[in-house]
Image (cartoon, rainbow, N blue to C red):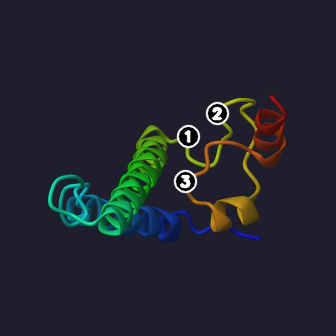
């Protein structure tokens, strides 16, 4: 399977833009503050929404880091090469996860640690 690196790069650039917009749009406050003047059930709902917003924001931030690192590897000419072992990353893996830095073998090894 031939890897279309230019297509993957466009995909990463698009994902970077989407994540940046998502991060700019997420409000950690999620609609108010917990505490005085609210019913306990309202406080619980707000606390849940705030926690969810923080988790979504952190996930988007971590994904953006991976996307930026992948774009850096493009610039360095090392995109598609595993950062751990130096072997080529399977084209199917790159197509599925274009921001991946690891071949499947090294990724599985990290899960075991």
Report helix, strand or loop for mark 1.
Answer: loop
C-beta proximity under 8 Å, tags 2 and 1: yes
- State the mark number for residue 105: none
Q: Nearer the viewer, residue 32 or 103?
A: 32
Q: Earlier in the sequence, mark 2 or mark 3?
A: 2
Report helix, strand or loop for mark 3.
Answer: loop
Residue beneath disc 1:
78
Please tell me in which quadrant of the rendered image residue 98 appears: bottom right
**Mark 2 or mark 1, which is nearer to you?**
2
Q: Earlier in the sequence, mark 2 or mark 1?
A: 1
Report helix, strand or loop for mark 2.
Answer: loop
C-beta proximity under 8 Å, tags 1 and 3: no
Quarter of the picture containing the C terminus is top right
Determine whether 83 is above or below 75 in the image: above
Residue beneath disc 3:
99
Q: Earlier in the sequence, mark 1 or mark 3?
A: 1
Left/right placement of residue 85 relative to residue 60 reads right
Quarter of the picture containing the N terminus is bottom right
Residue plotted at (38% across, 61% down)? 44
Residue plotted at (76% across, 38% down)? 87
- State the mark number for residue 83: 2
């Amino acid at each position: 399977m031939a890897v279309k690196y230019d297509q993957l790069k466009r995909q990463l650039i698009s994902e970077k833009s989407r994540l940046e917009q998502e991060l700019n749009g997420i409000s950690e406050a999620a609609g108010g503050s917990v505490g005085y003047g609210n019913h306990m059930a309202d406080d619980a709902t707000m606390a849940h929404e705030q926690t969810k917003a923080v988790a979504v924001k952190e996930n988007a931030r971590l994904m953006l880091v991976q996307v930026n690192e992948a774009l850096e590897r493009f610039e360095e000419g090392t995109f598609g090469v595993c950062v751990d072992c130096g072997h080529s990353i399977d084209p199917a893996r790159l197509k599925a996860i274009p921001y991946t830095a690891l071949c499947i073998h090294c990724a599985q090894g990290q899960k075991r640690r």
